Image (cartoon, rainbow, N blue to C red):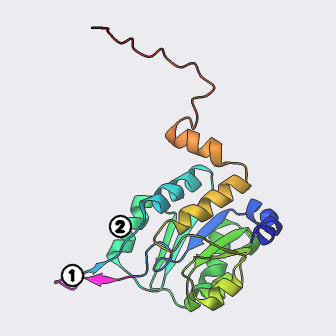
């Protein structure tokens, strides 16, 4: 995997748009219905924080899902995703619109998917990624397969890979969350203990 990843470094460095499937990628794939028939989905907070980091780095984000959902709409807004496309099938038909809207080439797109519905888009972009729980066909179409499962930090893993490969990780994290290390600044003296 490391060799395959090192061959992908040039493609990763060119990424200007991250597109993610939702169910099975940003969620764990389960859809739960409450007693009123409302859908519930489970998202990972680390994925959301990483999407905000990506935005700070100037890389745009889009979500494409086959199934429209209020929960997905709220989560996309919370993560400050640039665009949400819901109720879309087949997904790859959106590619010309995405290229025009974001002024990018297909080679500058990373797409993260997990199931057969994602194959069309994965076969057209520069850096297709499969989450650990993806179908066999999706893993075979991917240039990278995450260690983490969808809805369990897989998107965070992809974003960290992109930002580290582009040399932006530390700068962006510090811009959003503050210094990563205190080793280069003087430490304050520890308070003195009183003896009894």
- Residue 16 location, quadrant: bottom right
**Image quadrant containing the N terminus:** bottom right
Q: Is residue 36 magenta?
A: yes
Task: Give the residue at mark 1.
Answer: 34
In percent of width and height, residue 196 lies at: 27, 8
In percent of width and height, residue 5 lies at: 76, 68
Task: Describe residue 45's horizontal placement relative to residue 163 as left or right.
Answer: left
What secondary structure is found at the residue carrying circle 1?
loop
Task: Describe residue 41's horizontal placement relative to residue 104 as left or right.
Answer: left
- Residue 190 location, quadrant: top left
Q: Nearer the viewer, mark 2 or mark 1?
A: 1
Q: Nearer the viewer, residue 43 or 89?
A: 43
Residue segment shown in magenta: 30-37
Q: Is residue 145 above or below residue 49?
A: below
Q: CA distance from mark 2 to mark 1?
A: 18 Å
What secondary structure is found at the residue carrying circle 2?
helix
């Amino acid at each position: 995997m490391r060799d395959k990843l090192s061959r992908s470094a040039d493609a990763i460095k060119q990424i200007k748009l991250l597109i993610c499937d939702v169910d099975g990628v940003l969620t764990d794939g389960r859809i739960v219905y409450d007693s009123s028939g409302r859908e519930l989905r489970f998202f990972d907070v680390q994925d959301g924080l990483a999407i905000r980091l990506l935005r700070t780095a100037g890389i745009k984000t889009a979500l494409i899902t086959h199934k429209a959902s209020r929960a997905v709409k709220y989560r996309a807004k919370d993560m400050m995703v640039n665009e949400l496309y819901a109720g879309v099938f087949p997904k790859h038909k959106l590619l010309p619109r995405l290229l025009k809207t974001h002024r990018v080439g297909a080679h500058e797109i990373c797409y993260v998917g997990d199931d057969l519905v994602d194959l069309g888009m994965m076969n057209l972009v520069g850096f297709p990624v499969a989450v650990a729980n993806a179908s066999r066909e999706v893993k075979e179409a991917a240039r990278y397969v995450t260690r983490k499962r969808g809805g369990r930090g897989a998107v965070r893993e992809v974003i960290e890979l992109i930002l580290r490969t582009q040399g932006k990780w530390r700068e962006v994290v510090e811009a959003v969350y503050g210094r990563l290390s205190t080793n280069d600044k003087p430490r304050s003296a520890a308070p003195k203990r009183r003896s009894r």
